[in-house]
Image (spheres, rainbow, N blue to C red):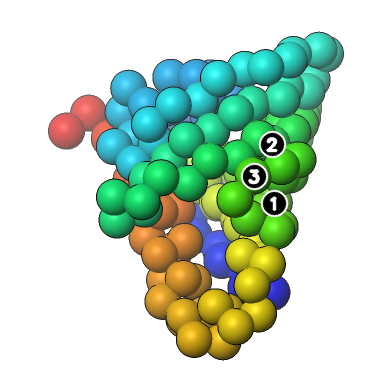
Amino acid sequence: MPYVESNIFIQGDINKIYQIAKDMERYPDFMPDVKSVKIINSSNNKTTTEWITSVDGTPICWTEMDEFDDQKRNIKYKLLEGDLEKFEGEWIFSEVDRGTEVTLTVDFDFGMPTLAELLGPILEEKVRENCTMMLTAMKKKVEGD
């Protein structure tokens, strides 16, 4: 199963960046490929969210469980249902000199072995591009254009 890890340095306070990441319903405001994020359920440090994104104009929809660890400042997510067989990973926030290192991991499986054989590298690159888009959008939101 493909695994993608992307990271970016953001010049900003780790707590502020973590709070922006936790506010997933606002992602469509500054992440072009995220069409909507809706909180279905929220309790303690967990939410169930419904996502609609676009990859090269093709909508991808799913519902995930998000778990927030405010002490470690990380967010784990895991697919509950949707267009993919497996989709899980985490946002990791690390304090570094003069800013924050943000890492986004995605472990995914499209659930179609034939498709994975034919398009595996292309699909993995699309997931990587999507991760980079999300991280870059967060950087621009924090640092400005």
Q: Which residue is at 56% across, 87% downward?
A: 117
Q: Earlier in the sequence, mark 1 or mark 3?
A: 3
Q: Position of residue 106 (x, y in %)?
A: 61, 57
Q: Mark 2 points at which residue?
A: 64
The numbered dot on residue 88 is 1
Quarter of the rendering containing residue 64: top right
Q: Marks 1 and 3, how far apart in space?
A: 12 Å
Find out whether the residues at labels 1 and 3 contact each other: C-beta distance under 8 Å.
no
Nearest the viewer among 119 and 20 is 119
Q: Is mark 2 on a helix, strand or loop?
A: strand
Query: How far is disc 1 from disc 2 in space, using C-alphas?
Result: 8 Å
Q: Which of marks 1 and 3 is in front?
A: 3
Q: Please tell me how crowded label 2 is: few (under 14), some (14-19), or many (20+) other residues with Cα within 10 Å.
A: many
Could you tell me if residue 71 is visible in this image? yes
Residue type (three-letter) at the residue carrying disc 1? Glu
Q: What amino acid is found at the position of numbered circle 2 in the picture?
A: Glu
Q: Earlier in the sequence, mark 3 or mark 2?
A: 2
Looking at the image, do the residues carrying marks 3 and 2 touch, with CB atoms under 8 Å apart?
yes
Of marks 1 and 2, which one's residue comes earlier in the chain? 2
Instruction: Identify the secondary structure beneath mark 3.
Output: strand
